[in-house]
Image (cartoon, rainbow, N blue to C red):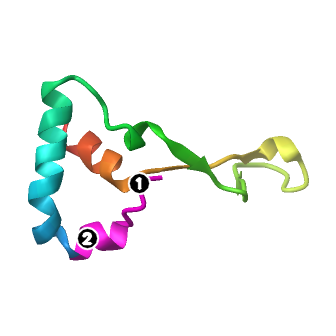
Amino acid sequence: PDDISSFVLKNCYQQMAKPLARMFNNSIRWVKFLRNGKMSTWSRHPIFKKDEKSEVENYRPISLLSCSSKVLERCI
């Protein structure tokens, strides 16, 4: 949802650290979560959970969250 891939965060962490830290600190200071952090996209392909693969109830949807919101959650 925020168009920042995990590849970019992982391989450009030195360049991304200060802007992300500023964004996270402001988010915490003003008690507001990142706008894109609340957004998610749904995967078109559900994942199998358990039991019979032929039963629709045995699959679950997948929600893709932004990488930056996952990083903020780990920091907190």
Taking the image as shown, residue 61 lies to the left or right of residue 19, namely right
Residue 30 at x, y percent in the picture: 17, 24
Task: Check the image and name the residue furthest to the top.
Answer: 31
Tell me if mark 1 has few (under 14), some (14-19) or many (20+) residues whose alpha carbon lies within 10 angstroms of its own.
some
Q: Secondary structure at mark 2?
A: helix
Report the span colored magenta.
1-11
Residue type for callout 1: Asp
Of 41 and 26, nearer the camera is 26
Taking the image as shown, residue 45 lies to the left or right of residue 14, namely right
Taking the image as shown, residue 40 lies to the left or right of residue 19, namely right
Residue 64 at x, y percent in the picture: 53, 51
Residue type for callout 2: Lys
Q: How many marks?
A: 2
Above or below, 60 against 54 in this view is: above
Q: Which residue is mark 2?
A: 10
State the CA–CA distance, disc 2 to disc 1. Answer: 15 Å
Mark carried by residue 2 = 1
Picture quadrant of residue 3: bottom left
Could you tell me which residue is drawn at 36 percent across and 55 percent down?
A: 67
Could you tell me which residue is drawn at 14 percent across and 35 percent down?
A: 26
Tell me the quadrant of the picture where the C terminus can be found: top left
Q: Secondary structure at mark 1?
A: loop
Tell me if mark 2 has few (under 14), some (14-19) or many (20+) residues whose alpha carbon lies within 10 angstroms of its own.
few
Of 39 and 10, nearer the camera is 39
Picture quadrant of residue 31: top left
Task: Check the image and name the residue furthest to the bottom.
Answer: 11
Of 29 and 50, nearer the camera is 29
Residue 32 on the magenta span: no
Above or below, 35 against 17 in this view is: above
Above or below, 17 against 64 in this view is: below
Q: Which of pointers 2 and 1 indicates the residue nearer the eye? A: 1
